[in-house]
């Protein structure tokens, strides 16, 4: 399944994207569609986790998913669409990181075994409830970071995680 983008509450598959001119970058460098952040939903098995850190750590909280070849290609192509043309998207670019860098524990983890939707309708879990191999839906934003003057690379920014199936 390709990544999905949501506009408000309406999911859009990347194969059904509106024209690129409908997207813009917010002042905080997040991809927007109209007045809403464009949310990307990625589905896969948890490959690596770093959802807790100590105060001295400079590493962002992160999650990496295992994808089949088609899913990895779709996830990379989504980033490539929104990056400057001179930048190739590498496997490391698919690691989903928490942008704010001020959290010590990632707390937006939900039970999505029955349904993924509004966080008010899903039970809240802790970082101890997620494990390597679990099947998850990771809700992300796309943000850009400047690499050189006038050129940028897009990256997935961690918003919330829904655990679909425990392994």
Image: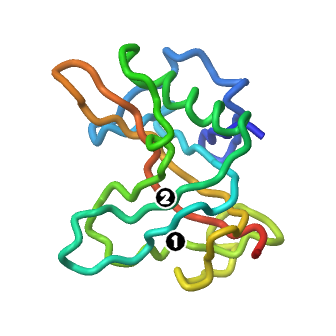
Q: Residue at x 65, y 52 (%)?
A: 66
Mark 2 and mark 1 lie on one chain; the one further toward the N terminus is 1
Q: Callout 1: helix, strand or loop?
A: loop
Residue placed most toward the observer, 131 or 7: 131
Q: Which mark is on residue 159?
A: 2
The quarter holding residue 111 reads: bottom right
Q: Is residue 87 above or below residue 2?
A: above
Packing grade of label 2 (10 A; few <14, some 14-19, many >=20) is many
Q: Tell me the residue that label 1 is attached to.
A: 108
In x, y percent, where is residue 129? 62, 83
Query: CB under 8 Å between callouts 2 and 1?
Result: yes
What is the quadrant of the N terminus in the image? top right
Left or right: 93 in relation to 121? left
Binning the other alpha carbons within 10 Å of mark 1 as few (below 14), some (14 to 19) or many (20 upward) gives some
Q: Is residue 30 left or right of residue 33?
A: left
Q: Between marks 2 and 1, how big is the CA–CA gap? A: 7 Å
Q: Where is residue 110 drawn, in percent x and y?
A: 63, 74
């Amino acid at each position: 399944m390709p990544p999905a983008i949501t506009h408000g509450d309406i999911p859009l598959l990347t194969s059904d994207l509106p024209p690129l001119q409908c997207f813009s970058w917010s002042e905080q460098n997040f991809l927007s569609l109209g007045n809403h952040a464009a949310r990307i939903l990625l589905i896969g098995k948890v490959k690596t986790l770093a959802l807790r850190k100590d105060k001295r750590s400079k590493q962002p909280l992160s999650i990496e998913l295992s994808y089949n070849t088609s899913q990895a290609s779709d996830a990379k192509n989504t980033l490539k669409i929104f990056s400057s043309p001179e930048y190739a998207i590498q496997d490391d670019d698919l690691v989903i990181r928490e942008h704010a860098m001020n959290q010590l524990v990632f707390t937006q983890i939900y039970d999505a075994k029955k349904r993924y939707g509004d966080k008010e309708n899903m039970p809240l879990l802790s970082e101890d409830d997620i494990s390597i191999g679990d099947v998850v839906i990771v809700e992300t934003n796309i943000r850009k970071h400047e690499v050189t003057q006038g050129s940028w690379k897009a990256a997935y920014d961690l918003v919330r995680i829904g655990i679909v199936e425990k392994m």
